[in-house]
């Protein structure tokens, strides 16, 4: 039921953008089945992250998000897959200027310990075996306890970033952020105003996260007119970076990788 239902579920993901713990800039309650919850949560998070561009002399520029997207997705998946579904508490994700926190109800399951998670060879355990199996079959997760190893590998690319986790208030709390105010020039030079290029990068990231996302959904997430999003998509098509396969309703997007 919670995996595939189209009805609003009792279990939600509460995600928001914060300036301080008591100053909420924006928030959203993500409802729906678990697969939709992952995609909608990632879309929201990406929409609140800054993007920078690094020009290396090649035709294709390098896109740099202020957080490793693959690591964030892994942590969101873990929170949704491994939470305690007997608890009425929501998964809670807070995006601060220099930190993202993810809280899911339910402490570590079975004999798994905090020290185990700090190693690369712990034995995975799950309280929600059917949910874990479903996400494994869709290739969203692996069964072998490699999730945190992949997160650490991604974070190594961000030298001033930290990653911590602890059992807290009957649940599990993850923090990923910067050890000090971000000093990387390439990120600092990104303004809060979304430029055309940055917006197009976000469109690409949304499509990577959900290749069936509609232009209407993208426009609603970015709070930008559908006409503007359609114009961005046309530019991406002309740049040979994106193509549409199938009809508007039943088709999907494909990202074209540079040669």
Image (cartoon, rainbow, N blue to C red):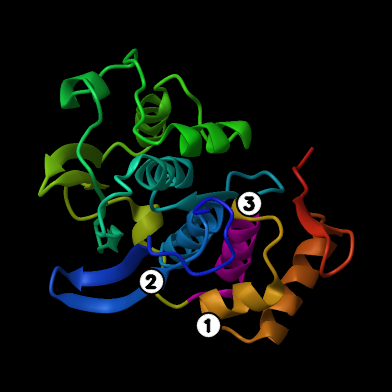
Q: Nearer the viewer, residue 76 or 54?
A: 76
Kind of element beneath mark 2 = strand
- Residue 174, compared with residue 200, is above or below; it is above
Residue furthest to the right:
246
Say what secondary structure mark 3 lies in: helix
From where the camera sits, is residue 140 visible?
A: no
Marks 1/2: CA distance? 17 Å
* Residue 208, label in figure: 3
Disc 1 versus disc 3: distance between alpha carbons? 19 Å
Q: Residues within 10 Å of mark 1 (few under 14, many from 20)?
A: few
Q: Is residue 99 above or below residue 78?
A: below
Q: Percent x, y for residue 108?
A: 22, 33
> Residue at 53% of width from left, 75% of height from top?
221
In the rendered image, is residue 82 in sight? yes
Query: Mark 1 or mark 2: which is in front?
Result: 2
**Rendering coords of residue 252 (x, y %):** 78, 57
In this figure, which residue is indicated by the disc labeled 2? Answer: 29
| Residue shown at 24% from the left, 57% from the top | 98
Q: Which residue is mark 1?
A: 223
Left of 132 or right of it: where is 122? left
Q: CA distance from mark 3 to mark 2?
A: 22 Å
Residue at position x 45%, y 53% from top?
A: 65
Q: Nearer the viewer, residue 11 or 176?
A: 11
User: x%, y% of residue 181?
Assistant: 19, 55
Say which quadrant the C terminus sits in. Answer: top right
Label 1 vs 3, first from the N-terminus: 3
Identity of the residue furthest to the left in this view: 169
Q: Which region of the structure is painted magenta? A: 194-207
What number is the disc on residue 84?
none
Instruction: Indicate the position of residue 148 as horizontal and vertical percent values.
Output: 35, 29
Indicate which label's residue lies in the foreground, 3 or 2. Answer: 2
């Amino acid at each position: 039921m919670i995996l595939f239902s189209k009805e609003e579920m009792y279990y939600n993901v509460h995600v928001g953008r914060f300036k301080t713990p008591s100053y909420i800039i924006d928030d959203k309650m993500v409802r729906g089945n678990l697969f939709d919850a992952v995609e909608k949560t990632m879309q929201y998070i990406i929409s609140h992250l800054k993007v920078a561009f690094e020009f290396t002399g090649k035709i294709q520029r390098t896109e740099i998000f202020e957080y490793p997207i693959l690591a964030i997705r892994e942590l969101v998946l873990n929170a949704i897959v491994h939470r305690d579904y007997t608890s009425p508490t929501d998964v809670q994700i807070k995006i601060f200027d220099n930190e993202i926190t993810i809280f899911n109800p339910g402490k570590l399951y079975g004999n798994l310990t905090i020290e185990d998670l700090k190693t690369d060879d712990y034995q995975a355990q799950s309280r929600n075996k059917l949910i874990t199996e479903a996400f494994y079959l869709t290739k969203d997760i692996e069964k072998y306890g490699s999730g945190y190893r992949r997160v650490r590998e991604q974070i190594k690319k961000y030298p001033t970033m930290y990653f911590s986790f602890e059992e807290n208030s009957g649940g599990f709390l993850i923090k990923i952020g910067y050890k000090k105010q971000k000093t990387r020039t390439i990120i600092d030079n990104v303004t809060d105003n979304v430029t055309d290029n940055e917006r197009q990068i976000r469109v690409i990231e949304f499509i990577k996260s959900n290749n069936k996302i509609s232009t209407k959904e993208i426009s609603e997430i970015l709070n930008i007119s559908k006409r503007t999003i359609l114009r961005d998509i046309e530019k991406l098509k002309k740049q040979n970076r994106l193509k549409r396969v199938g009809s508007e309703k039943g088709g999907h997007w494909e990202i074209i990788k540079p040669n």
